[in-house]
Structures are given as C-alpha cells and as structure tokens.
Image (cartoon, rainbow, N blue to C red):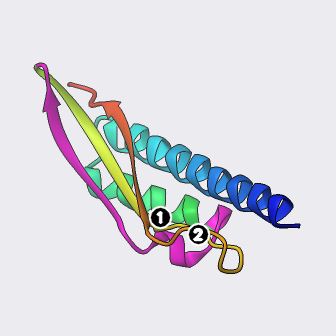
Amino acid sequence: MVLFLSVVQLALVQHVRNTCVDAAAEGARYAAHVGRTPADGAQRTADLLRASLAASYAQDVTADEVEVDGLTLVRVTVRVPLPVVGLLGPGGVMALDGHAPAEGV
C-alpha cells in the first residue's frame, strides 16, 4: 500500500510540475510578441494555471526580461507548493521557469 501511494504521489508531483512548466513557457511566448509586456505573460500564465489546476497555483507568478549571451529573453517564473497526498510526500515549493526570445521590431 505504501508503494502504491508513493507512486501516486510521484505522478501527482510530475503532473503539477509539467503543467506549470507548460503554462510558464506559454506565458513567456505570449509576452515575447511585439507589443506585449512581461506582465501580459504573467497574467496569461496565471489564467492557464487557474484553468488547468487551481487558483492556489496561480498566486505567485512573476515575469521579467533577462539578457543571456546578448539575447533578450522573457522569463516567467511560477512558484507552487508541492502537492502532497496524505503525509507521504515532501513539503516545500517548486520554482519553475519558462523562457522565450523577445521579438524585436
């Protein structure tokens, strides 16, 4: 029984992680379009998280522009709690990023 619940816990964490990374990447791509701002990407990410997981997972979303090797990127960061099934899983917070190259004019 413990093994089964451990596998369920791992699957739940992976699902939440993958969903948050996908939402952050989509938010970064959205913000990278000409005429959009990092705040637009953060809002898009939060909307996606509310629609796919729960409102509590959309509370800590930030976005900014960063420069890496001369390339301007939009970075969207999502900080979410680890989902815990019972008392088996670890506590804590996952910080997940999505990046996209910013479009120029």
For badge 1, the amino acid type reads Ala
Q: Quadrant of the N terminus?
A: bottom right
Task: Where is residue 40? Give x, y as percent.
Answer: 35, 55
Q: Dot 2 lies on which element? A: helix
Question: Does residue 19 appear left or right of residue 30 in this picture?
Answer: right
The residue drawn where x is 16% and y is 38% is 66
Find the magenta span and give its range. Answer: 51-69
On screen, residue 24 above or below 102: below
Tell me, for residue 50, which label it has, or none: 2
Question: Does residue 54 appear left or right of residue 60 in this picture?
Answer: right
102 and 22: which is toward the camera: 22
Q: Quadrant of residue 30?
A: top left
Q: Mark 1 Cα within 10 Å, few/some/many (few <14, many 20+)?
A: many
For badge 2, the amino acid type reads Arg
The residue drawn where x is 37% and y is 70% is 60
> Which residue matches tag 1?
46
Q: Quadrant of residue 102?
A: top left
Task: Where is residue 14? Give x, y as percent.
Answer: 64, 50
On screen, residue 5 above or below 64: below
The residue drawn where x is 78% and y is 55% is 7
Residue placed furthest toward the front: 2
Q: Dot 1 lies on which element? A: helix
Residue 53: in magenta span: yes
Residue placed furthest toward the right: 1
The reply to whether residue 4 is visible in this rendering is yes
Q: Quadrant of the C terminus?
A: top left
On screen, residue 70 above or below 46: above
The residue drawn where x is 70% and y is 74% is 85
